[in-house]
Image (tube, rainbow, N blue to C red):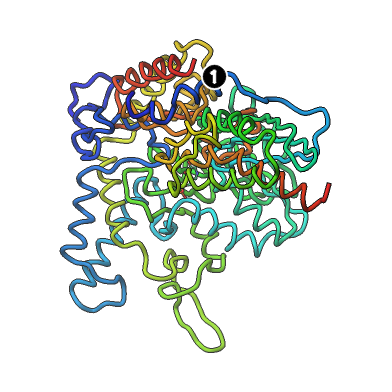
């Protein structure tokens, strides 16, 4: 399974089996629902924003190991960041998935393990689902000015 | 196909396989195990050869040509239509060549539906339809204020015939249903549904995309008004589909697409239409594709559609038996091979269908994962996606064994 282990690194399986920040927040500032119409993966993402920082990130939903582990890793990577830092990191992750940038391990944390997904174009959408939801949530919060 | 074969395996899958060049390739170093024929079938040598020969020997545009090659091209193109009409017992003039099954259904929705449907009229489909037999009706309903209703599916994945009967009434104008479900494998009692619909004065369309390739289908016996299917699922090329319609209904319908070929006369003040079937074939048709489809039909006739069905009943049995051995695995649709085709959807707790399909690919096994273009059915089943293994005449018991072993490995990997 040499090939597959590029895709399914141990860290990914670990986040899949044991999701960080799974569930819901008591007092979310903003919540969004995203899905991938091609495969039916779904995510419900909640953010608690305090003083311009992501003080709480929680996700729930259904999907494959890539989308679920990615949501778990995203929630860790974005927690405690400012909104701008979080948006930058989402953009960085998107570019990594498109093969346009090398992964910055320091900022991405465990999500660096998803770098191999870039080689599987059909699965890139799975990995991006939660990150795009995060971007949407932040932009929604801004437009609502909440 | 010799006479010495036992009745349960009336196809020599090993011999059939040799006719399909792609089946000898490897994927990730493993021999290809192709279990996605419900999505599209592989193509045998005679189909590839016929299309190749057409382009090499007599390529020309069809009809209207005076020169020899144009006449030959027309002859080969029309021979494809003749073959496909013969396969399903349809009249040639009622056999219209389209781009695919989806276009065939759209043709009826637009050429018949837009003009005939009135506000409050009902189009009855079922909960197990492919999007191809839902969305065209929704589009037309939007324009006409007609209503699309869905006949229910039972918990074991069969059509609820009594439920359907209760929904057919004086407002029902069209009953459009899938003959064999591409997700559940269920074989629907189309002839019974047609009788119910006709009694109420409604027309009937059967989406035969998953039946014509796999079993004997006779247009007259089914008793429907329209039958839609697609070339690429029946050993033929992509880019060609078929709408069979009762000529008297097609004759009274206005055209669908306008352009060359479908007209008798064109004047500034208006146009008149060609005879059936050409009235519904605007523009240069899929010529090489018709040649290929004709060769596919001949190949299937050579094997025999009864033999194909017998083989697939066995494949359905193997698949259902094998998958039933996997602890906690859920099979959707009937488990009785007499009631189903050889497309079997399933789910495995803890292994998402996409992860499973990715894992199987590593072992050279091609299965599909997703909603299979049947989202309303997925919602009824309460799952976002399933995995689906689907067999055809070139699959055998070893393919099922390979699938079973690989599912075991995938499960171990993700647990
Ligand atoms: C039941 C059913 N109907 C319709 C279609 C549509 O066929 P096509 O995409 O060739 O139009 C399919 C194939 O995906 C199918 O399985």
In front: B245, or A130? A130
Kindly state the secondary structure of the residue where label 1 is placed. loop
Residue B78 position in % (x across, y down): 31, 61
Is A112 placed left or right of B283 in the picture? right
Residue B265 position in % (x across, y down): 46, 82
Tag 1, which chain? B
Up-down relation of residue B305 to residue B120 (above or below) = above
Is B243 placed left or right of B123 in the picture? left
Read off the residue under disc 1.
B350
Is B358 placed left or right of A20 in the picture? left
Up-down relation of residue B83 to residue B408 (above or below) = below
In front: B170, or B354? B354
Is A123 placed left or right of B198 in the picture? left
In front: B123, or B358? B358
Could you classify mark 1 by the number of other residues whose Cα lies within 10 Å: few (under 14), some (14-19), or many (20 or more)? some
Q: Which residue is at a point 80% across and 38% down the rendered structure image?
A: A50
Q: Which residue is at a point 34% across and 49% down the rendered structure image?
A: B86
Quarter placement of the N terminus of chain B:
top left
Residue B44 position in % (x across, y down): 24, 42
């Amino acid at each position: 399974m040499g090939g597959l282990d590029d895709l399914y690194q141990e860290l990914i399986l670990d986040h899949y089996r044991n999701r960080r920040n799974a569930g819901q927040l008591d007092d979310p500032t903003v919540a969004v629902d995203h899905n991938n119409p091609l495969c039916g993966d779904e995510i419900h993402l909640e953010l608690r924003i305090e003083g311009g920082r992501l003080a709480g990130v929680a996700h729930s939903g259904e999907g494959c190991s890539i989308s679920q582990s990615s949501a778990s890793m995203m929630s860790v990577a974005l927690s405690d960041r400012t909104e701008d830092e979080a948006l930058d990191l989402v953009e960085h992750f998107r570019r990594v998935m498109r093969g346009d940038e090398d992964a910055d391990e320091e900022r991405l944390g465990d999500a660096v393990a998803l770098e191999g997904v870039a080689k599987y174009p059909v699965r890139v959408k799975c990995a991006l689902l939660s990150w795009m939801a995060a971007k949407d949530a932040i932009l929604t919060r801004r437009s609502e000015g909440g | 196909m010799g006479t010495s074969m036992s009745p349960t395996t009336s196809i020599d899958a090993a011999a059939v396989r040799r006719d399909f060049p792609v089946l000898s390739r490897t994927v990730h170093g493993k021999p290809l195990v192709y279990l996605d024929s419900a999505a599209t079938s592989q193509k045998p040598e005679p189909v590839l050869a016929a299309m190749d020969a057409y382009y090499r020997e007599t390529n020309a545009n069809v009809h209207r040509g005076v020169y020899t090659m144009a006449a030959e091209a027309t002859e080969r193109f029309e021979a494809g239509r003749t073959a496909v009409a013969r396969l399903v017992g349809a009249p040639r003039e009622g056999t219209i060549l389209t781009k695919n099954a989806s276009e065939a259904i759209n043709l009826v929705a637009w050429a018949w539906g837009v003009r005939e449907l009135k506000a409050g009229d009902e189009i009855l489909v079922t909960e197990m339809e492919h999007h191809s037999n839902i969305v065209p009706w929704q589009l037309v309903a939007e324009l006409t204020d007609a209503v699309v209703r869905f006949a229910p599916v039972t918990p074991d994945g069969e059509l609820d015939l009594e439920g359907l009967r209760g929904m057919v009434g004086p407002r029902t104008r069209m009953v459009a249903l899938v003959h064999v479900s591409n997700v559940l494998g269920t074989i629907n009692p189309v002839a019974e549904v047609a009788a119910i619909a006709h009694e109420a004065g409604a027309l009937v369309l059967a989406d035969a995309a998953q039946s014509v390739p796999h079993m004997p289908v006779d247009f007259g016996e089914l008793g429907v008004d329209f039958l839609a299917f697609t070339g690429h699922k029946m050993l033929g090329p992509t880019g060609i589909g078929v709408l069979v319609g009762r000529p008297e209904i097609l004759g009274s319908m206005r055209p669908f697409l306008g352009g060359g070929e479908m007209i008798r006369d064109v004047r500034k003040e208006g146009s008149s239409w060609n005879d059936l079937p050409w009235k519904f074939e605007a523009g240069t048709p899929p010529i090489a594709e018709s040649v290929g489809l004709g060769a596919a039909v001949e190949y299937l006739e050579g094997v025999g559609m009864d033999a194909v069905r017998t083989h697939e009943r066995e494949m359905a049995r193997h698949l259902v038996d094998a998958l039933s051995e996997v602890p906690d695995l859920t099979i959707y649709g009937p488990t009785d091979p007499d009631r189903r085709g050889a497309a079997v959807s399933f789910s495995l707790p803890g292994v998402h269908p996409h992860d499973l399909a990715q894992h199987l690919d590593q072992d050279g096994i091609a299965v599909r994962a997703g909603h299979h273009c049947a989202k309303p059915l997925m919602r009824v089943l309460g799952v976002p996606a399933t995995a689906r293994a689907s067999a055809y005449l070139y699959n055998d018991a070893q393919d099922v064994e390979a699938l079973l072993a690989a599912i075991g490995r995938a499960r171990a990997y993700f647990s």
